[in-house]
Amino acid sequence: MRNAREFNFDGLVGPSHNYAGLSFGNVASFNNVRSASNPRQAALQGLAKMRALAARGFAQGLLPPQARPNFRLLRRLGFTGTDADVLARAYRESPVILACAYSASPMWTANAATVSPSADTADGRVHFTAANLNNKLHRAEEHVQATRTLRALFANPDRFVVHEPLPSTPAFGDEGAANHTRFASAHGAAGVEFFVYGRVEFDPSAPAPTKYPARQTLEASQAVARLHGLDAARTVFASQNPAVIDQGVFHNDVIAVGNGNVLFYHDQAFADEAATLEALRRALGVTGTDLRAVRVDTGVVPVADAVASYLFNSQLLSKPDGGMALVVPHECREVATVARYLEQLVASGRSGNGAIDELIEFDLRQSMRNGGGPACLRLRVVLTDEEAAAMHQGVLMTEDLYARLVPWVERHYRDRAEPKDLADPQLAIECAAALEDLERILGLPGLYDLS
Ligand code: SUG
């Protein structure tokens, strides 16, 4: 077995972070539509999380924000003239399209890609596929920059492969790592890759939600598994429970999370709980490992409370000195059933009877108001020491990088953004200046195609 660590790449929140209510099926995004955001605070909250986890010895990096507004999208949709003309006309004729071009959503990097570590792939390289996110206009172009960014960070072809995204059509709806989890006895050991889908394009009789969209298809998950060269005996595909999608569980990472041999999940998460656990046990058995299932019952935490608190949108991290920590948002303390449950969970972990023995809490309210918790904010990439040395080092979180990024945020970010501000040509100029500076700070010239 190779020595490997799990790196978490958090999305650095961009200078135009805003609430536009663009995600039908995502309760928080809908509830906070058109309220004022604070981009500066959002970015600082995210950076504080990265810094704290890095200081605890977890391998931590960041993915840079995407260029906003997306002028290419606006021009393709017929808004012409100078940049100021494009913004004014889009705001007048279709403020929702302008909001899509300004979406904050690339900050949730769990949706940036699906990643398979080299221990799982046929060619022994780390494989990435940027998610096409084709269910929502405001996310459907993120893969262009995501692919470009991943190719800039993981450029060495002997170690890394960044595939083209899947075709952007409903049959291949792909939401990346938000619907993908990996289990293994240790990060560097051969693991089990677990894909959870919301619908099956080519089988209309398969379960599917009726109220809210299912964003991930089985066909997309299977294509990613093929591209990454995964071993069928160690790959599991499972259907999400359509009834929970209809209650606001728009990604599986809102109702389940896995790490090591632990699956932390709600009893309503899967369409067929017993068959899903059995398939995971069988696949893990191939690696000589037992599944440890930590199940939360509806009677203890109802689905609505799980969605309101983002209990399962937590990061489950193997601590450098043993044990596992659950990284949760403050909202988990504010929902009574969840607060009670967590107390008991950690107490039993500490007494040696459970897998999770520590809670780490963060204030991520700016992100939470758009439906993004700790797990949405990060992309997991397991890297051996050699692979880690082969990637671009400028995005790894250190005290030095943190100390350079905080003043950068304070220099470039506003402390308030409302829907009408998106029409302000000055905001677009400020965003471009911020990213130009960021390319220098991260040592990534040419990261953005600003032509
Ligand atoms: O795709 N919200 C994102 C939240 C993504 C959370 N990611 C994971 N669960 N991994 C989404 O729904 C809201 C944008 C707005 O409404 O302005 C938004 O896109």
Image (tube, grey):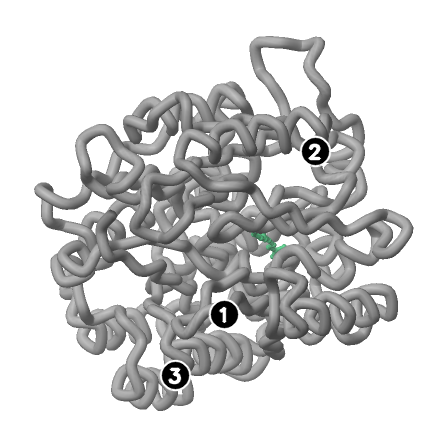
Q: Position of residue 119 (x, y in %)?
A: 27, 41
Q: Confirm or deny contact between disc 1 and disc 3 (CB under 8 A).
A: no
Quadrant location of residue 58? bottom left
Q: Amino acid at mark 1?
A: Asp
Residue assigned mark 3:
55
Q: Badge 3, how many Cα within 10 Å: few under 14, some, many 20+? A: some
Q: CA distance from mark 1 to mark 2?
A: 45 Å
Residue at image location 52% in from the left, 64% down from the top: 423
Taking the image as shown, residue 110 lies to the left or right of residue 313, namely left
Helix, strand or loop at label 2? It is loop
Q: Position of residue 103 (x, y in %)?
A: 51, 56
Q: Badge 2, how many Cα within 10 Å: few under 14, some, many 20+? A: many
Q: Is mark 2 within 8 Å of ligand 1?
A: no
Q: Confirm or deny contact between disc 3 and disc 2 (CB under 8 A).
A: no
Residue assigned mark 2:
270
Q: CA distance from mark 1 to mark 3?
A: 39 Å
Q: Amino acid at mark 3?
A: Ala
Residue assigned mark 1:
424
Q: CA distance from mark 3 to mark 2?
A: 36 Å
Asked whether 397 or 43 is in front, the reply is 397
Asked whether 76 or 370 is in front, the reply is 370
